[in-house]
Amino acid sequence: MGDPIHSVEQCPHCKKRLLNGAKCDCTWHTPSQNRQTTSYLIRYPKGQGEDLMVQDDHLTLDITHGWAVLVDQHGPCIAVPAHSGATITRIDQDPQPEE
């Protein structure tokens, strides 16, 4: 068996559960020079809206109650209703090497 659980905390940024005083490794705790920018491409059906690229170091995607919500460290940024027919694709980018 593993170690007993003495405490459970939650990262206030990413909501990850942290057991027994573990440290979170989410982007809010990563030095900016090592951080990978998160990007999402939102594509709407033809004639329904303009495609949109959203980028931020702290961007996350939450799906709740029929909505896709992009959230950064300040709160919700963009909300897309499920019935809109839009697709949301995460675009992973490699960090730029320092010269």
Image (tube, grey):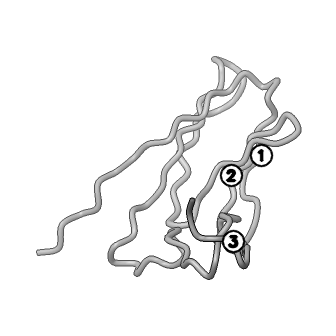
Identify the residue shown where x is 88% and y is 39%. 65
Q: Nearer the viewer, residue 49 or 81?
A: 81
Mark 1–mark 3 distance (CA, rounded to whole Å): 36 Å
72 sits to left or right of 84: left
- The reply to whether discs 2 and 1 touch (Cβ–Cβ < 8 Å) is yes
Identify the residue shown where x is 75% and y is 42%. 63
Q: In the image, what residue type sits under mark 1?
A: Ala
Mark 2–mark 1 distance (CA, rounded to whole Å): 6 Å
Q: Which residue is mark 3?
A: 5
Residue farthest along the front direction in this orientation: 1
- Give the label on residue 79, or none: 1
Residue 20, located in which quarter of the rendered image? bottom right
Mark 3 surroundings within 10 Å by alpha-carbon count, few (fewer than 14), some (14 through 19), many (20 or more) = few
The disc, 2 or 1, on the residue closer to the chain's N-terminal end is 2
Residue farthest along the right direction in this orientation: 65
Identify the residue shown where x is 39% and y is 69%. 35
Residue 14 on image: x %, y %: 65, 65
Q: Secondary structure at mark 2?
A: strand
Mark 3–mark 2 distance (CA, rounded to whole Å): 32 Å
Question: Comparing marks 1 and 3, which lies closer to the viewer?
Answer: 3
Q: Which residue is mark 2?
A: 70
Q: Secondary structure at mark 1?
A: strand
